Protein backbone atom coordinates (compact mmCIF):
# COMPACT_ATOMS: atom_id res chain seq x y z
CA UNK A 1 0.00 0.00 0.00
CA UNK A 2 2.83 2.39 0.87
CA UNK A 3 4.43 1.66 -2.50
CA UNK A 4 1.19 2.60 -4.25
CA UNK A 5 1.01 5.92 -2.42
CA UNK A 6 4.62 6.75 -3.27
CA UNK A 7 4.11 5.80 -6.93
CA UNK A 8 0.92 7.90 -7.13
CA UNK A 9 2.65 10.96 -5.64
CA UNK A 10 5.64 10.52 -7.93
CA UNK A 11 3.36 10.60 -10.98
CA UNK A 12 2.10 14.10 -10.23
CA UNK A 13 5.42 15.58 -9.13
CA UNK A 14 6.05 16.33 -12.80
CA UNK A 15 2.61 16.84 -14.28
CA UNK A 16 3.78 17.65 -17.79
CA UNK A 17 5.81 14.44 -18.07
CA UNK A 18 2.90 12.35 -16.76
CA UNK A 19 0.49 14.01 -19.17
CA UNK A 20 2.85 13.15 -22.06
CA UNK A 21 2.88 9.46 -21.05
CA UNK A 22 -0.86 9.08 -20.52
CA UNK A 23 -1.52 11.05 -23.73
CA UNK A 24 0.74 8.62 -25.59
CA UNK A 25 -1.27 5.69 -24.22
CA UNK A 26 -4.61 7.34 -25.05
CA UNK A 27 -3.58 8.38 -28.57
CA UNK A 28 -1.94 5.00 -29.25
CA UNK A 29 -5.11 3.16 -28.23
CA UNK A 30 -7.28 5.57 -30.22
CA UNK A 31 -5.10 5.26 -33.34
CA UNK A 32 -5.18 1.48 -33.23
CA UNK A 33 -8.90 1.13 -32.60
CA UNK A 34 -9.91 3.81 -35.09
CA UNK A 35 -7.75 2.14 -37.75
CA UNK A 36 -9.57 -1.13 -37.07
CA UNK A 37 -12.95 0.63 -37.16
CA UNK A 38 -12.08 2.24 -40.50
CA UNK A 39 -11.09 -0.98 -42.24
CA UNK A 40 -13.87 -3.02 -40.64
CA UNK A 41 -16.36 -0.44 -41.88
CA UNK A 42 -14.78 -0.52 -45.34
CA UNK A 43 -14.96 -4.31 -45.59
CA UNK A 44 -18.48 -4.52 -44.16
CA UNK A 45 -19.66 -1.96 -46.70
CA UNK A 46 -18.04 -3.94 -49.50
CA UNK A 47 -19.69 -7.19 -48.39
CA UNK A 48 -23.08 -5.55 -47.78
CA UNK A 49 -22.91 -3.74 -51.11
CA UNK A 50 -22.10 -6.97 -52.96
CA UNK A 51 -24.92 -8.80 -51.18
CA UNK A 52 -27.42 -6.03 -51.87
CA UNK A 53 -26.55 -5.46 -55.52
CA UNK A 54 -25.48 -8.80 -56.98
CA UNK A 55 -24.83 -11.72 -54.62
CA UNK A 56 -27.60 -11.91 -51.98
CA UNK A 57 -26.90 -14.23 -49.05
CA UNK A 58 -27.62 -17.46 -50.97
CA UNK A 59 -27.99 -18.28 -54.67
CA UNK A 60 -29.49 -21.40 -56.23
CA UNK A 61 -28.60 -22.54 -59.76
CA UNK A 62 -28.54 -25.49 -62.08
CA UNK A 63 -25.04 -26.93 -61.35
CA UNK A 64 -23.97 -26.31 -64.97
CA UNK A 65 -25.06 -22.68 -65.16
CA UNK A 66 -22.25 -20.79 -63.32
CA UNK A 67 -19.53 -22.22 -65.56
CA UNK A 68 -20.44 -20.35 -68.76
CA UNK A 69 -24.03 -19.19 -68.19
CA UNK A 70 -25.61 -21.43 -70.80
CA UNK A 71 -29.14 -20.33 -71.60
CA UNK A 72 -30.38 -23.93 -71.45
CA UNK A 73 -29.03 -24.54 -67.91
CA UNK A 74 -32.32 -23.72 -66.17
CA UNK A 75 -33.57 -24.65 -62.70
CA UNK A 76 -36.09 -27.48 -62.93
CA UNK A 77 -39.45 -26.28 -61.62
CA UNK A 78 -37.76 -23.01 -60.67
CA UNK A 79 -41.01 -21.07 -60.19
CA UNK A 80 -42.41 -23.64 -57.77
CA UNK A 81 -39.11 -23.79 -55.88
CA UNK A 82 -39.07 -19.99 -55.63
CA UNK A 83 -42.47 -20.02 -53.93
CA UNK A 84 -41.22 -22.61 -51.42
CA UNK A 85 -38.26 -20.43 -50.51
CA UNK A 86 -40.56 -17.45 -50.02
CA UNK A 87 -42.46 -19.44 -47.39
CA UNK A 88 -39.31 -20.21 -45.38
CA UNK A 89 -39.39 -18.20 -42.11
CA UNK A 90 -35.61 -17.63 -42.36
CA UNK A 91 -35.92 -15.96 -45.78
CA UNK A 92 -36.59 -12.23 -45.86
CA UNK A 93 -37.01 -11.98 -49.64
CA UNK A 94 -36.48 -14.13 -52.72
CA UNK A 95 -36.23 -13.34 -56.41
CA UNK A 96 -36.06 -15.47 -59.53
CA UNK A 97 -33.90 -14.26 -62.41
CA UNK A 98 -33.30 -15.06 -66.05
CA UNK A 99 -29.64 -14.32 -66.74
CA UNK A 100 -27.57 -14.28 -69.89
CA UNK A 101 -24.60 -12.50 -71.41
CA UNK A 102 -24.71 -10.49 -74.61
CA UNK A 103 -23.85 -7.29 -76.41
CA UNK A 104 -25.45 -3.94 -75.77
CA UNK A 105 -25.05 -1.47 -78.60
CA UNK A 106 -26.12 1.93 -79.80
CA UNK A 107 -25.41 3.87 -82.97
CA UNK A 108 -21.81 4.64 -82.03
CA UNK A 109 -20.43 1.77 -79.94
CA UNK A 110 -21.08 -1.55 -78.20
CA UNK A 111 -20.10 -3.35 -74.99
CA UNK A 112 -20.39 -6.77 -73.41
CA UNK A 113 -22.85 -7.03 -70.50
CA UNK A 114 -24.60 -9.46 -68.22
CA UNK A 115 -28.37 -9.15 -68.59
CA UNK A 116 -30.69 -9.84 -65.67
CA UNK A 117 -34.33 -10.48 -66.46
CA UNK A 118 -36.22 -9.78 -63.24
CA UNK A 119 -39.69 -9.72 -61.71
CA UNK A 120 -39.78 -6.09 -60.59
CA UNK A 121 -41.89 -6.61 -57.44
CA UNK A 122 -39.55 -9.37 -56.18
CA UNK A 123 -36.30 -7.67 -57.13
CA UNK A 124 -37.21 -4.48 -55.27
CA UNK A 125 -37.13 -6.43 -52.02
CA UNK A 126 -33.74 -8.00 -52.61
CA UNK A 127 -31.65 -5.50 -54.59
CA UNK A 128 -30.49 -1.97 -53.78
CA UNK A 129 -30.56 -0.89 -57.44
CA UNK A 130 -33.90 0.87 -56.86
CA UNK A 131 -32.24 2.95 -54.12
CA UNK A 132 -29.25 3.68 -56.38
CA UNK A 133 -31.44 4.98 -59.20
CA UNK A 134 -30.32 8.49 -60.20
CA UNK A 135 -32.52 9.16 -63.23
CA UNK A 136 -35.77 7.81 -64.60
CA UNK A 137 -37.74 4.97 -63.02
CA UNK A 138 -37.26 1.34 -62.11
CA UNK A 139 -39.47 0.28 -65.02
CA UNK A 140 -42.95 1.69 -65.65
CA UNK A 141 -46.26 -0.09 -65.39
CA UNK A 142 -47.17 -1.75 -68.64
CA UNK A 143 -43.96 -0.60 -70.33
CA UNK A 144 -42.50 -3.10 -72.77
CA UNK A 145 -38.84 -3.69 -73.64
CA UNK A 146 -37.52 -1.27 -71.03
CA UNK A 147 -34.00 -1.50 -69.66
CA UNK A 148 -32.24 -0.07 -66.60
CA UNK A 149 -28.48 0.45 -66.96
CA UNK A 150 -25.60 1.87 -64.93
CA UNK A 151 -24.71 5.51 -65.31
CA UNK A 152 -21.12 4.55 -66.14
CA UNK A 153 -22.28 2.25 -68.93
CA UNK A 154 -24.54 5.02 -70.23
CA UNK A 155 -21.53 7.33 -70.41
CA UNK A 156 -19.52 4.67 -72.21
CA UNK A 157 -22.27 4.18 -74.79
CA UNK A 158 -23.04 7.91 -74.98
CA UNK A 159 -26.74 7.28 -74.33
CA UNK A 160 -29.17 8.93 -71.96
CA UNK A 161 -32.62 8.44 -70.51
CA UNK A 162 -35.19 7.23 -73.11
CA UNK A 163 -32.44 6.43 -75.63
CA UNK A 164 -32.88 3.28 -77.70
CA UNK A 165 -30.30 0.50 -77.45
CA UNK A 166 -30.08 -3.01 -78.93
CA UNK A 167 -29.36 -6.24 -77.02
CA UNK A 168 -27.82 -9.07 -79.03
CA UNK A 169 -28.00 -12.47 -77.32
CA UNK A 170 -28.04 -16.20 -77.98
CA UNK A 171 -31.38 -17.98 -77.63
CA UNK A 172 -32.06 -21.29 -75.90
CA UNK A 173 -31.91 -23.03 -79.26
CA UNK A 174 -28.48 -21.53 -80.01
CA UNK A 175 -29.53 -18.90 -82.54
CA UNK A 176 -28.49 -15.25 -82.33
CA UNK A 177 -31.27 -12.74 -81.85
CA UNK A 178 -31.55 -9.05 -81.09
CA UNK A 179 -34.09 -6.85 -79.39
CA UNK A 180 -34.60 -3.11 -79.20
CA UNK A 181 -34.97 -1.62 -75.71
CA UNK A 182 -35.54 1.87 -74.37
CA UNK A 183 -33.57 3.17 -71.36
CA UNK A 184 -36.08 3.60 -68.52
CA UNK A 185 -33.64 4.39 -65.73
CA UNK A 186 -30.02 4.96 -64.79
CA UNK A 187 -28.45 3.76 -61.55
CA UNK A 188 -25.16 4.38 -59.80
CA UNK A 189 -24.09 1.91 -57.14
CA UNK A 190 -20.95 1.94 -55.02
CA UNK A 191 -19.35 -0.58 -57.41
CA UNK A 192 -18.44 1.12 -60.68
CA UNK A 193 -17.44 -2.15 -62.37
CA UNK A 194 -20.90 -3.59 -61.61
CA UNK A 195 -22.52 -0.46 -63.05
CA UNK A 196 -20.55 -0.88 -66.28
CA UNK A 197 -21.26 -4.56 -66.88
CA UNK A 198 -24.78 -5.29 -65.57
CA UNK A 199 -28.16 -4.29 -66.98
CA UNK A 200 -31.74 -5.12 -65.96
CA UNK A 201 -34.81 -5.89 -68.04
CA UNK A 202 -38.21 -7.30 -67.21
CA UNK A 203 -38.16 -11.07 -67.02
CA UNK A 204 -40.97 -11.56 -69.56
CA UNK A 205 -39.22 -9.38 -72.15
CA UNK A 206 -35.90 -11.21 -71.85
CA UNK A 207 -37.53 -14.65 -71.66
CA UNK A 208 -39.38 -13.95 -74.91
CA UNK A 209 -36.09 -13.27 -76.69
CA UNK A 210 -34.32 -16.26 -75.13
CA UNK A 211 -37.20 -18.68 -75.55
CA UNK A 212 -37.06 -19.80 -71.90
CA UNK A 213 -40.77 -19.33 -71.13
CA UNK A 214 -41.47 -19.22 -67.38
CA UNK A 215 -38.23 -20.98 -66.43
CA UNK A 216 -35.44 -19.23 -64.52
CA UNK A 217 -31.67 -19.51 -64.18
CA UNK A 218 -31.16 -18.18 -60.67
CA UNK A 219 -32.93 -17.87 -57.34
CA UNK A 220 -31.47 -15.23 -55.05
CA UNK A 221 -32.29 -15.35 -51.33
CA UNK A 222 -31.94 -12.54 -48.81
CA UNK A 223 -32.01 -13.86 -45.24
CA UNK A 224 -33.37 -12.21 -42.12
CA UNK A 225 -30.05 -13.01 -40.42
CA UNK A 226 -27.09 -13.01 -42.77
CA UNK A 227 -24.91 -14.75 -40.17
CA UNK A 228 -27.03 -17.88 -40.63
CA UNK A 229 -26.20 -18.18 -44.34
CA UNK A 230 -23.86 -21.16 -43.93
CA UNK A 231 -26.17 -23.44 -41.87
CA UNK A 232 -29.23 -22.51 -43.94
CA UNK A 233 -27.34 -23.19 -47.19
CA UNK A 234 -26.17 -26.54 -45.80
CA UNK A 235 -29.79 -27.44 -45.05
CA UNK A 236 -30.88 -26.52 -48.59
CA UNK A 237 -28.06 -28.60 -50.07
CA UNK A 238 -29.45 -31.66 -48.30
CA UNK A 239 -33.01 -30.90 -49.40
CA UNK A 240 -32.09 -30.22 -53.04
CA UNK A 241 -29.03 -32.34 -53.88
CA UNK A 242 -29.53 -31.90 -57.63
CA UNK A 243 -29.13 -28.10 -57.39
CA UNK A 244 -26.11 -25.90 -56.74
CA UNK A 245 -26.70 -23.94 -53.50
CA UNK A 246 -24.00 -21.39 -52.66
CA UNK A 247 -23.50 -18.69 -50.05
CA UNK A 248 -22.04 -15.32 -51.03
CA UNK A 249 -18.63 -16.40 -49.67
CA UNK A 250 -18.66 -19.49 -51.93
CA UNK A 251 -19.65 -17.42 -54.96
CA UNK A 252 -16.97 -14.79 -54.25
CA UNK A 253 -14.22 -16.64 -52.30
CA UNK A 254 -11.78 -13.80 -53.06
CA UNK A 255 -13.96 -11.39 -51.12
CA UNK A 256 -14.26 -13.77 -48.18
CA UNK A 257 -10.49 -14.31 -48.24
CA UNK A 258 -9.90 -10.56 -48.40
CA UNK A 259 -12.12 -10.07 -45.35
CA UNK A 260 -10.10 -12.64 -43.38
CA UNK A 261 -6.82 -11.19 -44.63
CA UNK A 262 -7.91 -7.71 -43.59
CA UNK A 263 -8.55 -8.95 -40.04
CA UNK A 264 -5.00 -10.32 -39.88
CA UNK A 265 -3.54 -7.15 -41.36
CA UNK A 266 -5.28 -5.13 -38.66
CA UNK A 267 -3.29 -6.84 -35.93
CA UNK A 268 -0.07 -6.18 -37.83
CA UNK A 269 -0.96 -2.49 -38.12
CA UNK A 270 -1.88 -2.39 -34.43
CA UNK A 271 1.45 -4.02 -33.61
CA UNK A 272 3.33 -1.32 -35.55
CA UNK A 273 1.38 1.45 -33.79
CA UNK A 274 1.98 -0.10 -30.37
CA UNK A 275 5.67 -0.56 -31.15
CA UNK A 276 5.94 3.16 -31.85
CA UNK A 277 4.00 3.81 -28.64
CA UNK A 278 6.42 1.65 -26.66
CA UNK A 279 9.45 3.61 -27.87
CA UNK A 280 7.73 6.85 -26.91
CA UNK A 281 6.97 5.62 -23.40
CA UNK A 282 10.45 4.15 -22.97
CA UNK A 283 11.98 7.48 -23.93
CA UNK A 284 9.78 9.47 -21.52
CA UNK A 285 10.13 7.05 -18.60
CA UNK A 286 13.89 6.76 -19.12
CA UNK A 287 14.26 10.54 -18.93
CA UNK A 288 12.16 10.52 -15.78
CA UNK A 289 14.37 7.87 -14.17
CA UNK A 290 17.59 9.67 -15.10
CA UNK A 291 16.25 12.92 -13.67
CA UNK A 292 15.44 11.16 -10.41
CA UNK A 293 18.82 9.52 -9.74
CA UNK A 294 19.19 11.38 -6.46
CA UNK A 295 15.71 10.27 -5.35
CA UNK A 296 16.38 6.61 -6.13
CA UNK A 297 19.75 6.84 -4.37
CA UNK A 298 18.09 8.25 -1.24
CA UNK A 299 15.41 5.53 -1.25
CA UNK A 300 17.95 2.74 -1.57
CA UNK A 301 20.20 4.40 1.04
CA UNK A 302 17.42 4.40 3.66
CA UNK A 303 16.67 0.74 3.08
CA UNK A 304 14.31 0.33 0.09
CA UNK A 305 15.46 -2.79 -1.75
CA UNK A 306 15.91 -2.96 -5.51
CA UNK A 307 12.79 -5.09 -6.01
CA UNK A 308 10.62 -2.35 -4.49
CA UNK A 309 12.34 0.31 -6.60
CA UNK A 310 11.72 -1.79 -9.70
CA UNK A 311 8.03 -2.29 -8.95
CA UNK A 312 7.60 1.35 -8.01
CA UNK A 313 8.63 2.41 -11.54
CA UNK A 314 6.35 -0.25 -13.03
CA UNK A 315 3.49 0.94 -10.84
CA UNK A 316 3.93 4.49 -12.05
CA UNK A 317 3.71 3.31 -15.65
CA UNK A 318 0.75 1.07 -14.81
CA UNK A 319 -1.15 3.92 -13.13
CA UNK A 320 -0.55 6.23 -16.08
CA UNK A 321 -1.74 3.46 -18.38
CA UNK A 322 -4.92 2.98 -16.32
CA UNK A 323 -5.66 6.69 -16.77
CA UNK A 324 -4.73 6.77 -20.46
CA UNK A 325 -6.76 3.69 -21.47
CA UNK A 326 -10.23 5.05 -20.56
CA UNK A 327 -9.30 8.34 -22.23
CA UNK A 328 -8.32 6.44 -25.42
CA UNK A 329 -11.51 4.35 -25.36
CA UNK A 330 -13.67 7.46 -24.87
CA UNK A 331 -11.85 9.22 -27.70
CA UNK A 332 -12.41 6.20 -29.96
CA UNK A 333 -16.13 5.96 -29.17
CA UNK A 334 -16.67 9.67 -29.82
CA UNK A 335 -14.86 9.69 -33.18
CA UNK A 336 -16.26 6.36 -34.40
CA UNK A 337 -19.83 7.42 -33.60
CA UNK A 338 -19.31 10.79 -35.26
CA UNK A 339 -17.92 9.38 -38.51
CA UNK A 340 -20.26 6.36 -38.45
CA UNK A 341 -23.17 8.74 -38.99
CA UNK A 342 -21.46 11.19 -41.35
CA UNK A 343 -18.88 9.01 -43.10
CA UNK A 344 -15.33 9.75 -44.20
CA UNK A 345 -15.41 11.01 -47.78
CA UNK A 346 -12.29 9.92 -49.66
CA UNK A 347 -13.56 10.81 -53.13
CA UNK A 348 -11.64 14.11 -53.05
CA UNK A 349 -8.36 12.19 -52.77
CA UNK A 350 -8.87 9.31 -55.17
CA UNK A 351 -11.48 7.34 -57.13
CA UNK A 352 -9.40 4.18 -56.77
CA UNK A 353 -11.71 2.73 -54.11
CA UNK A 354 -14.72 3.07 -56.39
CA UNK A 355 -12.81 1.47 -59.27
CA UNK A 356 -12.09 -1.54 -57.03
CA UNK A 357 -15.70 -1.82 -55.98
CA UNK A 358 -15.36 -0.07 -52.63
CA UNK A 359 -17.38 2.93 -51.56
CA UNK A 360 -15.51 6.24 -51.57
CA UNK A 361 -17.40 7.21 -48.40
CA UNK A 362 -16.37 4.99 -45.51
CA UNK A 363 -18.45 4.58 -42.36
CA UNK A 364 -16.23 3.25 -39.55
CA UNK A 365 -17.63 0.42 -37.49
CA UNK A 366 -16.05 -1.15 -34.42
CA UNK A 367 -17.26 -4.38 -32.89
CA UNK A 368 -17.45 -4.36 -29.10
CA UNK A 369 -15.48 -7.61 -29.00
CA UNK A 370 -12.42 -5.72 -30.27
CA UNK A 371 -12.21 -3.40 -27.25
CA UNK A 372 -10.87 -6.00 -24.83
CA UNK A 373 -7.98 -7.45 -26.92
CA UNK A 374 -6.80 -4.03 -28.13
CA UNK A 375 -7.03 -2.58 -24.63
CA UNK A 376 -5.04 -5.48 -23.21
CA UNK A 377 -2.43 -5.19 -25.96
CA UNK A 378 -2.05 -1.45 -25.29
CA UNK A 379 -1.83 -1.98 -21.51
CA UNK A 380 0.77 -4.73 -21.93
CA UNK A 381 2.80 -2.56 -24.30
CA UNK A 382 2.79 0.35 -21.86
CA UNK A 383 3.86 -1.84 -18.94
CA UNK A 384 6.58 -3.59 -20.94
CA UNK A 385 7.87 -0.16 -21.94
CA UNK A 386 8.58 0.59 -18.28
CA UNK A 387 10.77 -2.49 -17.72
CA UNK A 388 13.94 -1.04 -19.22
CA UNK A 389 13.69 2.29 -17.36
CA UNK A 390 12.96 0.34 -14.15
CA UNK A 391 16.04 -1.84 -14.70
CA UNK A 392 18.05 1.32 -15.35
CA UNK A 393 16.99 2.66 -11.93
CA UNK A 394 18.43 -0.45 -10.27
CA UNK A 395 21.89 0.33 -11.68
CA UNK A 396 22.25 3.50 -9.63
CA UNK A 397 24.64 3.21 -6.69
CA UNK A 398 23.22 5.02 -3.63
CA UNK A 399 26.50 6.72 -2.67
CA UNK A 400 27.02 8.09 -6.17
CA UNK A 401 23.37 8.89 -6.90
CA UNK A 402 22.93 10.96 -3.70
CA UNK A 403 25.70 13.35 -4.78
CA UNK A 404 24.09 13.89 -8.22
CA UNK A 405 22.84 17.42 -8.64
Image: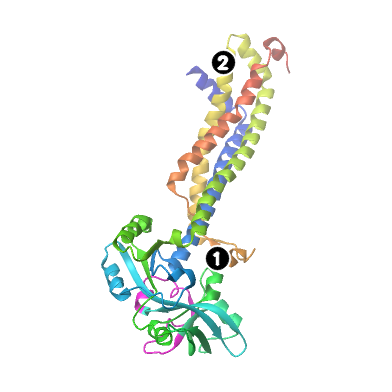
The percent position of residue 173, horizontal first and vertical second, equals 43, 84
Q: Residues within 10 Å of mark 2 (few under 14, many from 20)?
A: few
Report helix, strand or loop for mark 2.
helix
Quadrant of the rendered image containing residue 10: top right
Q: Residue at x 65, y 19 (%)?
A: 393
Q: Please give the range of residues in magenta.
A: 121-146
The percent position of residue 278, horizontal first and vertical second, equals 62, 35
Quadrant of the rendered image containing residue 154: bottom right
Q: Which residue is the site of mark 2?
A: 307
Above or below: residue 170 compared with residue 348 = below
Report the Cα–Cα distance between label 2 and label 1.
58 Å
The percent position of residue 138, horizontal first and vertical second, equals 43, 81
Instruction: Quadrant for the C terminus, please.
Output: top right
Q: Residues within 10 Å of mark 1 (few under 14, many from 20)?
A: some
Above or below: residue 14 compared with residue 403 = below
Q: Nearer the viewer, residue 104 or 297?
A: 104
The percent position of residue 259, horizontal first and vertical second, equals 50, 54
Q: Which residue is the site of mark 1?
A: 357
For residue 404, side relative to residue 376 (left or right): right
Q: Residue at x 62, y 42 (%)?
A: 272
Q: Main secondary structure of the magenta part?
A: loop
Above or below: residue 187 compared with residue 313 = below
Q: Is residue 136 magenta?
A: yes
Q: Is residue 68 magenta?
A: no
Amino acid sequence: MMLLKIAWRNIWRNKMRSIVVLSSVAIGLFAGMFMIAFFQGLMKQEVDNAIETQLSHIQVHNPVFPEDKEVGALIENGSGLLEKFKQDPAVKAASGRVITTGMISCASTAAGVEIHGIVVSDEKNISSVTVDLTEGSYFSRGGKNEIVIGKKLAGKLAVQLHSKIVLTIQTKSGDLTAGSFRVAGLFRSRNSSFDETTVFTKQDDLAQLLGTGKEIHEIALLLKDGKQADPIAASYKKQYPSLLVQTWSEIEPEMAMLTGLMDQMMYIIIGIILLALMFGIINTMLMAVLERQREFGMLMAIGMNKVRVFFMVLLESFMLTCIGLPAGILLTIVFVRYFASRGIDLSAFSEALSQLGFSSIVYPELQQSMFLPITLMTALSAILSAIYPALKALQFKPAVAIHKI
